[in-house]
Amino acid sequence: MKVRLATSGLLLLLFLCTCDRAAKSAPVRTTNNDLEAAARPVKTTVLAGLRRPWSMKFLTEDEALVTEKDGGLLRVNLREKWRRPIHGLPEDLADSLHVDTFRMSRWDTYPAAHGRVGKFNAGLLEIVLDPDFADNQLVYLSYVAQQSEFGYALRVIRATLAGDRLTDPDTLLTVPPFTPVMYHFGGGMAFGADGKLYITAGERLFWDSQQPSEPIAQNLRDPRGKIYRINPDGSIPADNPDFGPEAVPGLYALGIRAAQGLALHPRTGQIWFTEHGTIQGDELNLLRPGANYGWPLESTGAYRGGYEPPEREVVTTRPVWYWLQTVAPTGLAWYFGDEFPSWQGDLLVPGLSRGSLWRVRTDGETVKSLEELLVDDRSRTRKVVISPGGKIYLLTDEEEGKIIRVENAATLTQYE
């Protein structure tokens, strides 16, 4: 009996050890919760050879309109990989500038820019579709208009998309003065939940030390450095904030340096926007009617050219978030797709500087956390665009620009 008991105990021990080794070597299938939390973003180039793509709006899940800052307007198909031009662009679209510092002030050019040929910050910028595009085929374009050899300013038009041509263009907004400075035009646009068109206009300075005694973005009579709110036909909404009789028409907010990205939250109806600082000072803001965002009286960064802002008694709106390093944030987008379930409700913010891409987790109007994505695969990114089906695309700001798809490489089966 004792021998039998000992033998039985030995067999039991061998069985348990065998099961333990088998458990350690067998594949572990993830649960639904594990799968939902898994996010391994990777990049795939969909289209290349674009001339600094700036904006993209989807017509279908596969077909879209793309603006090239240094090129034209394209109709592209991301599945079949074809592109063709849209004709009928504005005749006053800014051409390339040959920088001749003997004929221009050094304050109008980048440092050491003599002899360079390029559009700098000028060109074709944002495109948005009318809320009733399916019925009226109306599109809105922001671009840099050229009035003379050294005269440039932001302009917004509305036109009808008839096949592969723009027809019946109508100017909705021009932001003078026309100057030689080819920087910081703004040009970001978005329709709000109220059906109004919101437009960013930069202050147009490279050197902060060139501010007049009354700073541009704080001057209610100066169209630059502002955010506008207009009706789709260019008229001014009756319920716009009242800044007084001397304020430029259509004004919605002021104190802007170089905002380019606007993003409507599809559930709250709030509009968030990015803002470029000079030396650091990059911000994420929530758009509020009548707000003064402080530039250049306040900045979370430093100033260029030894500038010291004047002291003024004004009430300003602080950023929701600001970075301690230079990011150069641009065209942001809210994500509610299914491919990255753990990202739902997060804000995706690209940066031109160092090719960063940030995932921003918010709680109401508060930023709770940030994650920098794809740090091992950077690209100078102008805009994040979400397709109707929830796919994530990036537009790269390069001479040989790309449309990049961000996919989730997470798998169902993993091994310990």
Image: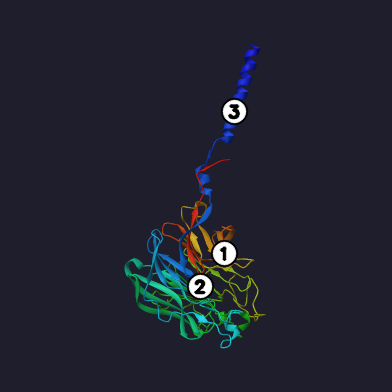
Q: Position of residue 231 (x, y in %)?
A: 41, 75
Mark 3 nearby-residue class (10 Å; few <14, some 14–19, many ≥20): few
In the rendered view, would you say 55 is above or below 216?
Answer: above
Q: Quadrant of residue 312?
A: bottom right
Mark 2 nearby-residue class (10 Å; few <14, some 14–19, many ≥20): some
Who's the residue at 60% across and 31% down the image?
20
The residues tagged by marks 2 and 1 sit, at their Cα atoms, a distance apart of: 32 Å
Q: Residue furthest front?
A: 115
Q: Nearer the viewer, residue 22 or 350?
A: 22
Way the structure is coloured: rainbow
Q: Earlier in the sequence, mark 3 or mark 1?
A: 3
Residue 406 seen in the figure? yes
Q: Position of residue 19 (x, y in %)?
A: 58, 29
Who's the residue at 54% across and 38% down the image?
27
CB within 8 Å, label 2 to label 3: no
Q: Position of residue 297 (x, y in %)?
A: 62, 77
Q: Which type of secondary structure does the marked residue at label 1 adopt? A: helix
Who's the residue at 50% across and 72% down the image?
289
Q: Which type of secondary structure does the marked residue at label 2 adopt? A: loop
Disc ID at residue 18: 3
Q: Which residue is mark 2?
A: 289
Q: Residue furthest bottom?
A: 103
Disc ID at residue 355: 1
In the rendered view, would you say 390 is above or below 167?
Answer: above
**Three-letter amino acid code of the residue under disc 2:** Pro
In the image, 185: left or right of 61?
A: right
**Three-letter amino acid code of the residue under disc 3:** Thr
In the rendered view, would you say 170 is above or below 83?
Answer: below
**Three-letter amino acid code of the residue under disc 1:** Gly
